[in-house]
Every structure is written in C-alpha cells, then in structure tokens.
Image (cartoon, rainbow, N blue to C red):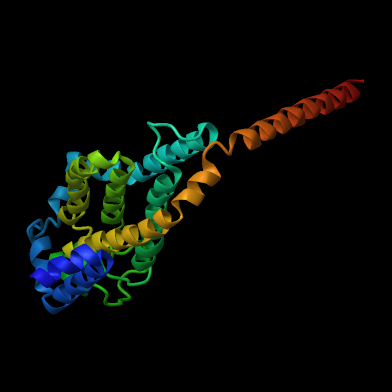
Amino acid sequence: MARGRSLVRDRPASALFALLVLVSLAFAAFPHLDLAVSGLFAVPGQGFPLSRDEGLLAIRDLNRVLPIWIASALALLLLARGLWGARRFLPPPHAILHVLSVYLVACLGIVHMLKNTVGRARPEHILAFGGEDRFTVAWQFSDACRTNCSFSSGEAASAMAMMALAMLAPRGLRLRAGLTLLLPMLVFSLNRVAFGSHFLSDVLVSWLVVALTALLLGRVFARHAAAIDGGIDGRWRAPLARALKRLRVFGRDAAVQARALFLRAAA
C-alpha cells in the first residue's frame, strides 16, 4: 500500500498508465462486468428505455455542444492575452493551450482513432440486448462496426477533458473547481452507459486515456510556460492592427474598382 501511494505521488503518469492496464485486463478477464452493468439499464424487448428519456437526451446534447463552447471561450481568452497581455482575471496562455491540447490530442486524436479502428459494437447492437452483433471485450478488434464505434467513449473523453478547466482557476481554487466539475463529468459519461451506447469499460478507458494525456501534456506546457507566455502576451496587438489596416485598404480599393466597373457598364 505504501509503495502504491509512493508511486502515485512520485510518478503519477506511471500510476495512471498502470491503472489503465489493470482496468483493461480486469474487463478482459471478467467480460461479464460490462454485460452486467449495461444489463441494469436494458429491458427485454425494449432495448434501453432511458435512451428515449427527454431529460437524458438533453443532457447528451449538452455534452455534445459543450466542447465547441469551451474551445470558443478558450480561443477568446487566448486572444485577450495576445491583445492585452497579462491580466489578473485571465489565465496564462500556456494553461489555455494545455486545455485546448487535451481536447485536440486526447479526444479528437487518440479516442477518435480508437472509435474508428477497434470496431467494438455498442451495447444496444449486441445479441445479449436484442441486437445482431456479438459482444467483444475492450481493446479487442472486431469488424462489427466500421466508424464511430463503442470503444472508447468520445462523450466520456470530452467530459473528462472538461476537468482540465480546473487548472485555469487560481491555485487555491483548483481543488474546488475540480470537485465542481466532477458531478457533470460523471453524469455526462454514465448517461451514455444508461443509453446502451457505451459499455462501462469504454467510459473508464476514455477517462484514463484523457487523464494520462492531460498529465503528460501538462508537463510539456509547464516546461515551456515562460517561452509560450512571453511569445503571446501583448504580442498580437500590432500584427492585428496591421492586418486591419490592410483589410481597410483592400476594402477601399475593392470598392473603388467595383464603382469603376459599374460606371463603365452603365455607360
């Protein structure tokens, strides 16, 4: 036990990777775990009734648009730092880019690749729950599904990536911010299990993949924080002013040319 605590404290990336391996092996060795959890939400002859619940559908839809809203807000924060430089209420550029990179690398990169290569059928599509495909365990390649498959969960990945937003809060408020984000992360993720759209192992693997990616990327951005912040803070005002000036000149010239063409055509 003491060795495990030491590993988590001194080598958190190794601890997360070990946990990912252990979780994957556990679901491979005991596949009935996935079937049992999904079976809690399945009704013979009806599939997964909760997938038709309007409230849960609204939660699913919210989780699907949140990454777009979050990315847009982070882009605006980054623009603000580039224009105005360091401000007390604005998180540093390296922290903003860290969160954006978690969504890009973990969610759109790793998890999206898994969803389109492993080929695991969703719970609602397997024989045990009224479908036509056979059940396969986590990480087992299958030809049951070609794109946007069950393993691993994209919604759980984006929900876990949302937890990285806590790192944008002041240091003394990060734990509180993380605990605040924990509940919606769990609801967004487990909602997909209740829908019959993902197995529990799909969700857990996505959580761990995103957490491990966020930790490793955080080290990279922390190591280069000074260079990143120095290259962005207040450095975009002059280039933006020049770009706007060129745009005005271009617009004025285009208007003059258009007017000349109109007069020529009218003559």
Residue at x 37% of width, y 59% of height: 219
- Where 139 sits versus 247, above or below? below
- Out of 189 and 149, give the one closest to the viewer: 189
Residue at x 10% of width, y 56% of height: 41
- Out of 18 and 153, give the one closest to the viewer: 18
Residue 207, visible in the rendered structure: yes
Q: Which of the image's four quarters has the N terminus? A: bottom left
Percent x, y of residue 111: 34, 62
Percent x, y of residue 187: 18, 47
Percent x, y of residue 16: 23, 66
Q: Which of the image's four quarters has the C terminus? A: top right
Residue 104, visible in the rendered structure: no
- Out of 75 and 144, give the one closest to the viewer: 75
Percent x, y of residue 72: 43, 39
- Where 56 sits versus 243, above or below? below
Residue 112 falls in image quadrant: bottom left
Residue at x 31% of width, y 52% of height: 161
| Residue that protrudes farthest toward the right in the picture | 267
